[in-house]
Amino acid sequence: MPSLFRFLMIVGTLVAVGYGSLYVLAHYFEPETKEVRKSLPSVKIRKE
């Protein structure tokens, strides 16, 4: 039983560290927003 408890504690700690690192990345490192323009060669607009 102690080995199961130790295993669950290690897995829980790893999950908490992963979740915390994703939280920090999501909230403190915002990506820069920029406008993207791309022409579509296969789309043709009909003029009537």
Image: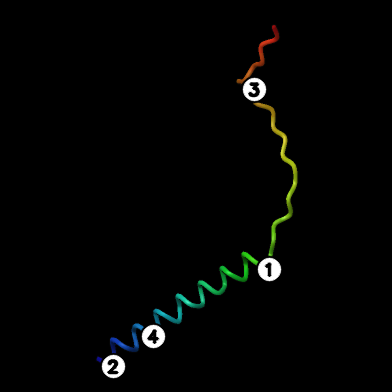
Within 10 angstroms of label 1, few (less than 14), some, or many (20 or more) residues?
Answer: few
Toward the bottom, the furthest residue is 2
Q: Nearer the viewer, mark 2 or mark 3?
A: 2
Q: What distance separates the C-alpha of mark 3 from that of mark 1?
A: 38 Å
Q: Nearer the viewer, mark 1 or mark 2?
A: 1
Disc 2 on helix, strand or loop?
Answer: helix
Q: What distance separates the C-alpha of mark 2 from that of mark 3?
A: 64 Å
Q: Do callouts 1 and 2 mark residues in contact (Cβ within 8 Å)?
A: no
Q: Is residue 45 above or below residue 16?
A: above
Q: Do callouts 2 and 3 mark residues in contact (Cβ within 8 Å)?
A: no
| Marked residue nearer the N-terminal end (1 or 2) | 2
**In the picture provided, is 11 more to the left or to the right than 20?**
left
Disc 1 on helix, strand or loop?
Answer: helix
Q: Residue at x 72, y 35 (%)?
A: 37
Tell me, for residue 41, which label it has, or none. Answer: 3
Which quarter of the rendering shows the N terminus?
bottom left
| Marked residue nearer the N-terminal end (2 or 4) | 2
Residue 11 lies in what quarter of the image?
Answer: bottom left
Q: Amino acid at mark 1?
A: Tyr
Q: Amino acid at mark 4?
A: Met
Q: What distance separates the C-alpha of mark 3 from that of mark 4?
A: 55 Å
The residue carrying mark 4 is 9
Q: Residue at x 45, y 82 (%)?
A: 13
Disc 3 on helix, strand or loop?
Answer: loop
| Marked residue nearer the N-terminal end (2 or 3) | 2
Q: Amino acid at mark 3?
A: Pro
Within 10 angstroms of label 4, few (less than 14), some, or many (20 or more) residues?
Answer: few
Q: Amino acid at mark 2?
A: Pro
Q: Do callouts 2 and 4 mark residues in contact (Cβ within 8 Å)?
A: no
Q: Residue at x 64, y 22 (%)?
A: 41
Give percent across and percent down for residue 42: 60, 20
The residue carrying mark 2 is 2
